[in-house]
Image (cartoon, rainbow, N blue to C red):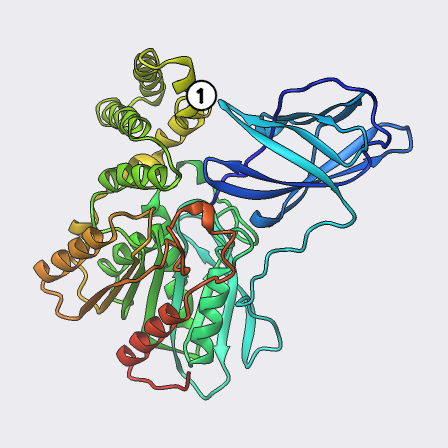
Amino acid sequence: MKLLLILLTASLCQQASPSKGLEGIWQGTLDAGGAKLRLVVNVTKQPDGKLAATLDSPDQGATGIPLDSVTLTGAAVRFELKSAGGVYEGTLNQEGTAIEGRWSQGPGSFPLVLTRAEKPPAAPLRPQTPKPPYPYDTEEVSYENGAAGVRLAGTLTLPRAKGPHPAVLLISGSGQQDRDETILGHKPFHVIADYLTRRGVAVLRVDDRGVGGSAAGPSLEKATSEDFAGDVVAGVGYLKSRKEIDPKKVGLVGHSEGGMIAPMVASKSADVAFVVMLAGPGLPTEEGFAAQVTAIARANGESEAAVAWKRRLLGRVFSVMREERDDAAALRRAHEERAKLLAELSADERKSYGLAGDEMEGIIRIMLTPWFRFFTAYDARATLGKVRVPVLALAGEHDLQVVPAKEHLAAIAAALKAGGNRDYTTRELPKLNHLFQTSETGSPAEYGRIEETVSPAALELIGDWILKHVGATHGK
């Protein structure tokens, strides 16, 4: 569940040469379909007299991205970042204090005014991010998933009270993520680990395959959620091997796709004592994906016509995926279906519909990966019906990524009940988004602007439920 870095372009006008050069710090706010992001361009002059620059996106925690070219011709300014297909073109004013232009990528083109600044903007506040010294022990660990030939690395936090302790393994959402599930400067898993360890629960958080200290393994590009479930099994085995851990009280806390993987593991392993699903799915993934696209598009102010067009396009691509197992043939057919739908649109509609442009190429390729094929064919209800251990399933009222929250929670409860599970709790938490932040609309565009990383109420609910089920009590 990582956001793509949004990049720039523009149209230019000519005017008299400005009184100042381009060297210095330039900052502005890009409003791209409701996603407001601060951008900072740092321009320097090299010894040979040529200009060089780097790009920062403070709200996304991205800094020092080298730009491929920087030019100032008269008053015309141009920045290019080839790896993302981004170009910014604008006009520097006579005073040399502002650049007015546009930033484009694929079919999108957005106005962006950059103004000269004396110093870069402060990093967004993240007051919940834990800072040492900690009242518990922290250990860097690694272990093998021998079946997959993958070595995994992470951080184990251990209470200082006498053990053995109950423990949880945190499981991240979609995409390769670090052990803190870092997104837009937020570190949700670090916050959760800190909170639970202070309450007496040991926590293992792990870099996903190919990230940080974890190896990619021999076939990361072909890995599916089922393969990542194997990594979780290895992590549970590692926790059980530690003398500080009570082997009968090891549970799983999974977020988003991790909330899908946790029941997969618990349904097959007798070593899992409980499961916490944070924004985990209960409905078939294909159905949920279409609902996600619709909800986010509406939250970003897109027209109902655009929403309907996107749903038609996704429906046709999903049909191709189901009918055509050969990836090359499926890619060809998917583009044919897109071309048919694009032919129905006017030039203006093609520009304004987010999935109508060249970036759809990348989206279609992702949809044809083994991971996405498995993910969208998966029906969580069949797995949940086999889970016998206690389950806590939480969802945010404003979640626009696993939607609709009420329906997912109802499906989770129904599947657990049908399977004979008598110890489960489902709860929709008011105003919380997919990251369990207190939000206004739930749009991903808000994630970086919100200072809160994880709602304290959600943390308390998770901690209380876990301690109740492991038969332990500890101060808050």
The residue depicted at 44 percent of the width and 67 percent of the height is 192
Q: Nearer the viewer, residue 324 or 69?
A: 69
Determine the image quadrant of residue 103: top right
Q: Nearer the viewer, residue 6 or 68?
A: 6
Label 1 SS = helix
Looking at the picture, does residue 87 appear above or below residue 171? above
- In this picture, residue 98 sits left or right of residue 316: right
The residue depicted at 29 percent of the width and 39 percent of the height is 289
Task: Work out which quarter of the rendered image holds the C terminus and state it.
Answer: bottom left
Q: Is residue 1 visible?
A: no
Kindly give the residue lying farthest to the bottom in the view shown: 162
The residue depicted at 39 percent of the width and 70 percent of the height is 459
The residue depicted at 40 percent of the width and 61 percent of the height is 438
Q: Is residue 434 visible?
A: yes
Q: Amino acid at mark 1?
A: Lys
The residue carrying mark 1 is 351
Looking at the picture, does residue 139 appear above or below residue 36? below
Q: Position of residue 56 (x, y in %)?
A: 66, 43
Q: Position of residue 431 (x, y in %)?
A: 34, 59
Looking at the picture, does residue 46 appear above or below residue 128? above
Q: Position of residue 79 (x, y in %)?
A: 70, 27
Determine the image quadrant of residue 195: bottom left
Q: Position of residue 97 (x, y in %)?
A: 77, 36
